Amino acid sequence: MYSPAVIEHFTNPRNIGYIEDATVAVQYGEPSCGDCLLVFLKIDNDILREMKYKVLGCAAAIATASMTSVLATDRSVAEALELTESEVAEALGGLPPDKMHCSNLAVGALKAALRVYLSRQEQAAEQSS
Ligand code: FES
């Protein structure tokens, strides 16, 4: 059912955990199944230096969160916002059709956190002008 890469990332997830001094942290849920993810980003000079997460979800949710963190790390904020669910699924050798929605969780959480970061940046720029 799952590709070898999905099984490998599920059993050995990369970058799992917290970032104490995260630039931004958000909680994000997948309404269709109730799974959720806490994501922590460390951003320096508009580069995503580190992504960590805690996930409460299925095997595919864990594997896609792991792969999302690998693919997003060291991208600029703009590049990280372009990461897609299909890119994550492809990097994992594909997901079963009924599990494709699971890749929405981590990618959605990443983008929600990046939008919070950008909104704070805008607010800070407005306050200083
Ligand atoms: Fe909920 Fe996979 S079943 S994210």
Image (tube, grey):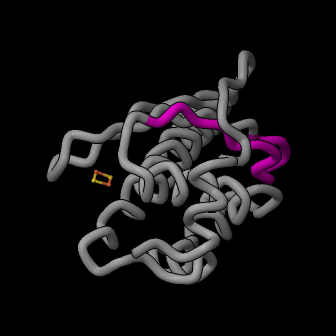
Q: Residue at x 47, y 36 (%)?
A: 55
Q: Point out the image quarter for the N terminus.
A: bottom left
Can you name the residue that lies furthest to the top here? 20
Q: Point out the image quarter for the C terminus.
A: top right
Which one is in front, 48 or 91?
91
Which one is in front, 122 or 73?
73
Which one is in front, 25 or 46?
25
Left or right side of 105 for 80: right
Question: Relative to residue 39, is residue 60 depicted above or below?
Answer: below
Q: Quadrant of residue 75 in the image?
A: bottom right
Q: How many marks?
A: 0
Q: Residue at x 72, y 47 (%)?
A: 14
Q: Position of residue 4 (x, y in %)?
A: 61, 73
Q: Position of residue 111 (x, y in %)?
A: 48, 54
Q: Which residues are magenta?
A: 43-55
Q: Residue at x 48, y 59 (%)?
A: 107
Left or right side of 28 for 87: right
